């Protein structure tokens, strides 16, 4: 949120949200947050389930593998008049584009949740967590072709700005974490997050506290687990030398033993919307491609949000065989199709 919200705008916002809070249902209390599957999940090539249900009895050292297409996207879903985008018009255009990805992590899904989900065909979905002493919910939504469970939401313990400094404290911003099942017995801890915005020292201090809070969760819930993190980190180069966001990012990567997909592939277009990952003793994760998806525009070529849609392909493999990383995409693969989309 980058707008400066006046007292009058806050009153308008509260009235506007009175009709949209009802969209916030599952997951707001930390309970498992699963959509009811309405279509079978496509199997990975390495998924060897048999009709007699013995898939989970495979030898533990059997190598299985697959690829995951992932999108992280801040959809600028503040109520109309407060968003820097036009979410009332753009959100229905975003919805069907999510189907090009097996996993879509949304941020700022504040006021148009039903429109965002309206044409998304993923069998497993969540809705944003409820406001927690705030006007806005957490804005974090998951769409997945793979089942996930044990979803828990955490509000940041520190934020900066109610009526200034990007107004972060008006929302229950934070992170959610769930257990994503890529194949029988192959699970990854999946995080979706939205960190404090703004370039002031108070914003930096809030982000520093948020990085520490995230590291604590990674060291407890996710200790020894493979991890994928996507979201709007708001970590970038700043002109103010006292605001060392890149130092915060480096601390997060080093202490949690994470890789940044863009950096790993030398993408040359580092953004605040990031995908981070790490493997474990039993599961290897590797970024195969990174791209800004060019399809998230209207008919006139205008962006559907004030953020770009970042698409990453990640390979996974169990057992001890290494994974070969592919080349970074520069906007689209060699055949001209955007990453995550069919060639046609």
Image: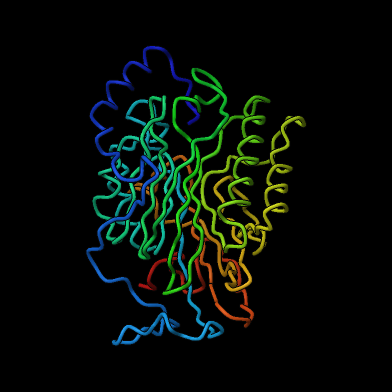
Work out which residue is located at the far top of the displayed protein and give it.
7
Q: Nearer the viewer, residue 183 or 292?
A: 183
Q: Quadrant of residue 239?
A: top right
264 with respect to 8 (left or right): right
Q: Residue placed at 28% from the left, 50% from the top?
A: 117
Q: Is residue 69 above or below residue 276?
A: below
298 with respect to 233 (left or right): left
Q: Residue placed at 63% from the left, 51% from the top?
A: 219
On the image, the x and y values in percent for residue 318 come to 55, 77
On the image, the x and y values in percent for residue 298 come to 34, 48
Image quadrant containing the C terminus: bottom left
119 with respect to 87 (left or right): left
Q: Is residue 223 above or below residue 59?
A: above
Q: Quadrant of residue 263?
A: bottom right
Q: Is residue 194 above or below residue 99?
A: above
Q: Nearer the viewer, residue 284 or 53?
A: 53
Work out which residue is located at the far right of the displayed protein and give it.
241
Q: Quadrant of residue 75?
A: top left
On the image, the x and y values in percent for residue 138 come to 42, 37
Q: Is residue 134 above or below residue 303?
A: above
Q: Residue placed at 39% from the left, 35% from the top?
A: 85
């Amino acid at each position: 949120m980058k707008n400066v919200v006046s007292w009058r705008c806050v009153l308008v916002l509260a009235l506007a949200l009175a009709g949209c809070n009802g969209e916030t249902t599952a997951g707001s209390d930390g309970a498992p947050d699963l959509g009811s599957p309405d279509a079978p999940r496509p199997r990975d090539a390495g998924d060897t389930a048999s009709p007699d249900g013995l898939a989970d009895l495979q030898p533990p050292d059997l190598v299985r593998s697959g690829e995951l297409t992932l999108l992280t996207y801040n959809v600028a879903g503040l109520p109309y008049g407060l968003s820097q985008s036009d979410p009332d018009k753009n959100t229905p255009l975003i919805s069907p584009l999510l189907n090009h990805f097996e996993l879509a992590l949304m941020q700022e899904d504040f006021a148009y949740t039903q429109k965002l989900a309206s044409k998304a065909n993923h069998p497993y979905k969540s809705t944003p967590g409820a406001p927690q002493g705030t006007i806005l919910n957490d804005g974090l939504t998951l769409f997945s072709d793979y089942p996930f469970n044990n979803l828990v939401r955490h509000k940041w313990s520190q934020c900066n700005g109610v009526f200034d400094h990007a107004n972060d404290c008006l929302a229950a911003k934070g992170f959610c974490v769930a257990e994503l099942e890529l194949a029988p017995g192959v699970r990854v801890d999946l995080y979706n997050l939205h960190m404090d915005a703004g370039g002031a020292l108070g914003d930096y201090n809030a982000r520093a506290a948020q990085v520490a809070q995230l590291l604590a969760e990674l060291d407890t819930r996710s200790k020894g687990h493979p991890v994928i993190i996507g979201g709007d980190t708001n970590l970038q180069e700043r002109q103010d030398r006292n605001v060392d966001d890149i130092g915060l990012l480096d601390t997060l990567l080093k202490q949690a033993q994470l890789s940044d997909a863009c950096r790993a592939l030398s993408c040359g277009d580092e953004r605040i919307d990031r995908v981070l990952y790490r493997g474990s003793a039993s599961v290897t994760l590797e970024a195969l491609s990174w791209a800004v998806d060019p399809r998230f525009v209207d008919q006139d070529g205008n962006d559907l949000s004030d953020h770009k849609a970042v698409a990453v392909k990640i390979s996974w493999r169990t057992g001890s065989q290494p994974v070969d990383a592919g080349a970074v995409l520069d906007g689209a693969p060699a055949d001209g199709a955007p990453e995550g989309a069919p060639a046609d």
